[in-house]
Image: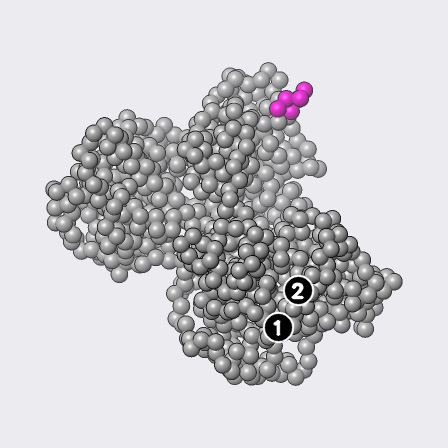
Amino acid sequence: MTQRLVVIGNGMAGARTVEEILARSKNRKENRNEVGGEGRIPDGNEVGGEGRNPNRNEVRGEGREPGEGRSAEREARRSGEGGGDGGFVVTMFGDEPYGNYNRIMLSNLLAGVEDEAGIFLNDLGWYADNGITLHSGTRIERIDRTAKLVYAADGTATPYDKLIIATGSSSWTPPIKNINNPKRGYHQGVFAFRTLDDTRGMIRYARDHERAVVIGGGLLGLEAARGLQNHVSEVTLLHAMGHLMNVQLDERAGTMLKDSVESRLGIKVVLNAMTTEILGKDRVTGVKLADGTVIDADVIVVAAGIRPNTRVAADSGLTVERGIVVDDQMRAIGEDDIYVVGECAQHRGEMYGLVAPLWEQAKVLADHITGSDPDAAYRGSKLHTKLKVAGIDVAAMGLKEPETDDDEVIVYSEPKKGLYKQIIIRDGALVGATLVGDNSKAAGLIQAFDRGEPLPDVRAELLFDLGGAKAEVTPGEMPDDAQVCNCNGVSKGAICGVVDGGCRTVSGVMDRTRAGKGCGTCKPLVQRIVEWAAGGEAEEDPAASWYVPGVPMPKPELMAVIRRYELKSVSSVFDKLVPGGEHDAKSKMGLASLLKMMWADEYVDERDARFINDRVHANIQRDGTFSVVPQMKGGVTTPDQLRRIADVADKYGVPMVKLTGGQRIDLLGVPKEQLPAMWADLDMPSGYAYAKSFRTVKTCVGSDYCRFGVGDSTALGIALEERYQGLEGPGKMKLAVTGCPRNCAEAYVKDLGVVAIDGGRWEIYVGGAAGAHIRKGDLLTTVGTADEVIRLTGRFLQYYRENANWLERTYTFVPRVGIDRIREIVVDDSDGIAQALDAAVEEAVQAYQDPWKERAVPATPGQFRTSLPLTVLPQVPVRA
């Protein structure tokens, strides 16, 4: 009989539990069919069912009054339409207005190494495909255990046969004076670090401020501090205890971690720091400690711990202590039909905040609720973790300090290198281990800890390679149930099973199992296991070499075919080269850039192939408005230009005028319909601050005024920007010219940087970066004249344009190709293509048109039509 399953919580634990239930329901159905079951056609309302009715299985946001729809469900069960044994109609509720995302990845999002799309685990299609009704942005406030109803904040009720509570936890706020504002929650400038909205707000606010304080020196606080370094210039970490990560590490390990955080990352750490007050009236200006110390700050992040969300359970009469108390089957005490999973569950007095125990709980719950294994029982978890904390290797498992005189302790410490290793052995078994600075032995230690395996007589072999011993456990030596990915609970056996099923590419295995999709530290091990399971070498994913995902060709082959058939529009590429002529939206922007690079003024522009920024020639902001950045060649402007910018800002009520890192002025918060008029009033060219193109040339004062200048960097920077303005590319191209090796224009960390040196010569560096990725550029060559700089700049940029992958910046392209090879081609002309590169970039230069001239005659009727109000994405329908 199909049952109604309601899940309160759409976070990692709740969604993972539903995934486990899906898998078991699918297996049961397949097994029934194999043994000659009823052969019925499953309805889409059953978990895992196929052939579902799409109208009934949308991810929908409508609420139901008590009893509404019950008669239809009864009739479906009566007729067998709703599925048979073990099937569920699933309804999920989530406080946040989103699908399920990986909370572990928020630190990567804050650090700028991951975008929002990359952290979502289940898109809306997953809910729809599995017949799941998702009520996002809907809080459940009460459970009627007798009537088997859950009541939402809006008063609507949903019936259940089985209920899963997966409410997780929330950020804990210490009792600090002025931390809250009665009218808006946290004081302005104070943030928690727990949700996607927390992270968004932090990023947005930090961009305009310089000093941050993070309260809390645990894992989350360290990750927050590291991530904030990408947005502010100064970060101070305050921890109330005597050493960092005091829950996982002993004092010596915590001290070693502190030294590494301060010396390697430049984060100031203050221990035994009890924050007593948030300073500032309208917005934060600092914090005050118990000893009277005042630390100035514009941004404050609270990462002082978490507390389980148990209120709905307590208000509904369930047994709650620190968490919601459960038995070994993950059922709430005294309840046959209510299960609890995740951070809100208290099992045998213990609560767990790491993901691995949550996955173990989810498996037991799924086994029991589906009947796949009625005897399944959760016995608790042996805790271990292996990860990078703010970029520093840390592993911890079991005891952090010996508990008896008989415990055997082996310690290795090398403070100058930031290395600390400790193992604790009891009765011949590993009961604890701590590693800081080197995780190379972590996998073997975790295996010995989990399984109680015999240990070598020479204990040092657990920490070091002695006498030529293997550096690490090989995939063949690992048991099938050895956990590979702690973030997503993926075992070696699961990975091998996917390979045995026919998937032999690393990317394909990662997509199917999610191994390596969390913090990413296990990716090398995943690759080794795939290679081992595939018989020695994994297959190369063909799609990995495609220039865009929708056209099955690598870039050189794609360009050759485009030239052969003279394909000058995006639609013609799809029609000619894609089987079935299917137009792939994700490929359009990359193809448009490529075709514009190849054909210059012969390119046939199709506006729907452009990203919104390229359609309206401005950078869209989070609220749907745009930014306007006029060109200031080489960072040089005039009083007349400044007056025009000020007048325009006044006339149009621009909310913010901001100096950019590229030495320009940014007008922020401009509605789309005002763009043409604003461009006309400015009467300045576009600064291209929105496109995958040549952006700007940053310069220093140069030789005219600077006492140290040995070259006219300003004039050369202006000349470069005048020549290559708007040049299309596979990624952004940011340049700089500095008048001496003191590098005031930061030329060493640009896509192409030029540095003046003694003797009237210029050094050219390529492949630098100073954003989310930091890399000093490689020296391409040294030349004697500005003309040579301009010519070789164009030649390098054209070679990059023709050979880089879509969205591949030069800091990736240069090391991939190799600076020696690039020098051979661009400087030495070893391949004989220098003349062709020069001609191609000249053609692109001659085809340049200022896009802001479209203000007179819009390219399409709706090009500058209002787009506000804009609903922030990603989100799903919210229950009415």
Identified at 58% across, 81% down, the residue is: 682
Residue 741 vs residue 251: left or right?
right
Q: Which circle, 2 or 1, is nearer the viewer?
A: 2
In depth, the one of 573 and 750 nearer the eye is 573
Q: Is residue 610 above or below residue 552?
A: below
User: Helix or strand or loop: what does disc 2 sit on?
Assistant: helix
Residue that numbered label 2 is attached to? 840
Q: What stretch of residues is rendered in magenta?
A: 465-470
Q: Quadrant of residue 390?
A: top right
- Residue at point 34%, 30% (across, down): 378
Count of marks placed on residues: 2
- Report the front residue among 587 and 19: 587
245 over 178 or under it: above or below: above
Residue 848 badge: 1
| Helix, strand or loop for the magenta stretch, by majority | loop
Q: Can you say which quadrant of the picture contains the N terminus?
A: top left
Q: Does 347 sit above or below residue 109? A: above
Q: Earlier in the sequence, mark 2 or mark 1?
A: 2
Q: Residue at x 82, y 65 (%)?
A: 785
Q: Tell me the amino acid under the disc marked 2.
A: Ala
